[in-house]
Image (cartoon, rainbow, N blue to C red):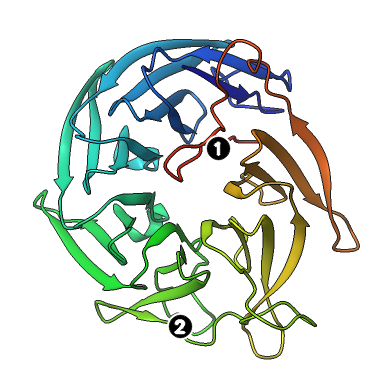
Amino acid sequence: MVAVVEQPAATPAGGPNDENRPVSIDTQHNDMIHDVQLDYYGCKLATASSDRTVKIFDVANDQYTHTATLQGHEGPVWEVAWAHPKFGVLLTSCSFDGTVMVHREINPGKWAVLHTHRLHESSVNSVAFAPHEFGLMLAAASSDGRVSVLSHRDDDTWAVLSFSDNALGVNSVSWAPYCGSSDSGEEPKPRLVTGGCDNRIRFWKLAKDVWEEETGAAASSLEGVSGPAHTDWVRDVAWAPIQNVIASCSEDRTVLIWTRGEKDRSFIPTLLHTFEAPVWRLSWSITGNILAVSSGDSSVTLWKQDMAGTWEQVSTVEDTTAADAQPTHAHTHGHPVSANIPY
């Protein structure tokens, strides 16, 4: 299987060159690729596949060198996520088999499983590390309708908190960025947004070791439109690096941008675009000013907000392998792929 990664416009030393063009990588996966993620520095690439493996590549000078194949899952691997480098070289993966695995690179090219989480009774569809200021913490969203949050302790054990989101299943989870202490000196609380099979997004906040839903945190419909904001499964949610912007996408072919209102402080949705196919995955640039959108017609588009607040398409990532290989942003079993690219 071939992965297509768009080169960033500028990357740290040792990363890809500065040409803004797609690069095709022969990942040697034996089945569909569902996720592709670059690490914090853009120097390592992880790919997740239905062949039940995760493959790791070192990235240097436009070269992608395969260095490891991570095994252990007993079903398709849907997503991977890198931890902040302050915790070392850590990668988490989630699978249809209901597990979450945390992997650590102990020596160059040599990996070990740090922890395996088996709380969920069904497929784990999404996984994400919290902002590093909260410590080594990750969230996992499952088809069993629950979200679990794992926190690493000083004695190398993991504390687990979980909560019920909705009975139909949770497809995606994303963390709010760390916002610093308030004027009163109060430390910020971890927050999450989830997207589910009940067509809704929900907001959650950690308070006294309990995850509580922030009821009323999001408007239920688009302004001037009756009915729910999304009319089909929410496939992905992505909290931008800036505090008050969230993107969501759905089987209903729409992408919504949620911004916090000045009066009631709830998140208000506006329509970014209605696409020609269901929309599967979203990814923000590091600065939060560009949104990548992956849809079911094997297209990836980039969107940017202008000075007037209107979102405009600024680029399309062409599938350079369509003629001779299946594109990585195709989907199966409801799990497409979209690379997390540092712009």
Q: Position of residue 301 (x, y in %)?
A: 73, 39
Q: Tell me: residue 39, above or below residue 204.
A: above
Inspect this view and state whether residue 112 appears.
yes
Identify the image quadrant of residue 311.
Answer: bottom right
Quick one: label 1 or label 2, which is nearer the N terminus? 2
Q: Residue at x 16, y 61 (%)?
A: 159
CA gap between label 1 and label 2 equals 29 Å
Dividing the image into 4 quarters, which one contains the C terminus?
top right
Query: Given the image, on which type of amino acid does mark 1 rest?
Result: Ser
Q: Describe residue 105's horizontal placement relative to residue 172 as left or right.
A: left
Q: Position of residue 164 (x, y in %)?
A: 29, 73
Q: Position of residue 323 (x, y in %)?
A: 66, 12
Query: Given the image, on which type of amino acid does mark 2 rest?
Result: Glu
Label 2 sits on residue: 214
Q: Position of residue 132 (x, y in %)?
A: 39, 52
Q: As rendered, which of 199 and 177 lies closer to the eye?
A: 199
Helix, strand or loop status at disc 1: loop
Q: Describe residue 335's horizontal placement relative to residue 298 as left or right.
A: left
Q: As rendered, which of 302 and 343 lies closer to the eye?
A: 302
Label 1 sits on residue: 338
Q: As rendered, which of 165 and 39 lies closer to the eye?
A: 165
Q: Residue at x 22, y 49 (%)?
A: 98
Q: Which mark is residue 4?
A: none
Q: Describe residue 302's horizontal placement relative to residue 308 as left or right.
A: left
Instruction: Say if mark 1 contacts mark 2, CB within 8 Å.
Output: no
